[in-house]
Amino acid sequence: MDEAIKTSRLKTQVANAVLHDVDAGVKELLEGIAEWNSTGLVVTTGLGYSMVTHAYFQAGRWEETLKYAQIGIEHIASCEEKHFLSEILRYKAEVLAMDNSTADEAESLFKESIEVAKEQGSIALIERANNSYASYLQRIEKGQDAEKILNA
């Protein structure tokens, strides 16, 4: 199947997962990831795991968000590409930041997300990671630190 068609199909699967039925949409996404993997295009499946993580995050399903964030992180590490790693780390940090017992890990992941985005030179991902981290810092009453992040 042509790569452009697969990418378009993946976007449709994400839209279904986020806008309609999360479980059905995620099932489609996972089938799409398996299909990508079967063709040997494993580099692009980081996108798929990022989208699964996003769908569960948007649905407020934290356990699944963390599960697929970890699967995505492991997948990306196994194929030595960092596409979409920044987003996956950011989603994982957002969920962990909800619990004071995992605040240190969340803060570390926010910082890693920012660094990965900077390494990739993606202004959009840097902004998303910075904004998420700054929002977290404001929630824990570290407004001055948040200002530093946003003004960096």
Image (cartoon, rainbow, N blue to C red):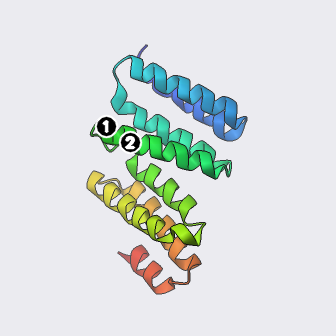
Number of residues whose C-alpha sits closer than 10 Å to that of mark 2, classed few (under 14), some (14–19) or many (20 or more): some
Task: Classify 144 as above or below 77.
Answer: below
Q: Residue at x 54, y 32 (%)?
A: 11
Pick the residue in front: 144 or 64: 64
Number of numbered discs visible in the structure rendering: 2
Instruction: Specify the amino acid type for callout 2.
Output: Glu
Q: Which residue is mark 2?
A: 74
Judge left or right: residue 94 versus residue 130.
right
Farthest top residue in view: 1
Q: How far apart in space, not on screen, are marks 1 and 2 (Cα)?
A: 6 Å
Can residue 60 be seen in this snapshot? yes
Outermost residue on the right side: it is: 20
Lateral position of residue 83 relative to residue 138, left or right: left
Determine if residue 3 is in view.
no
Which of the numbered marks, if any, corresponds to residue 54? none
The answer to whether the residues at label 1 and label 2 have Cβ atoms under 8 Å apart is: yes
Q: Using the image, determine if residue 30 lies above or below residue 97.
A: above
Residue 101, image x and y in percent? 55, 70
According to the picture, the residue beneath numbered tag 1 turns out to be 78
Residue at the extreme bottom:
144
Amino acid, disc 1: Ser
Q: Residue at x 47, y 65 (%)?
A: 106
The residue under the point 46% across, 59% down is 128
Which residue is drawn at the image coordinates 45% and 71% (left, top)? 104
What kind of element bears circle 2? helix
Q: Is label 1 in a helix, a strand or a loop?
A: helix
Crowding around mark 1 (Cα neighbors within 10 Å: few <14, some 14 to 19, many 20+) is few
Residue 152 is situated, as x and y percent measured from the top left of the image, at 35, 75
Q: Nearer the viewer, residue 42 or 18?
A: 42
The location of residue 24, given as percent across then percent down, is 68, 29
Residue 117 x, y percent position in the rendering:
34, 55
The quadrant the N terminus occupies is: top left
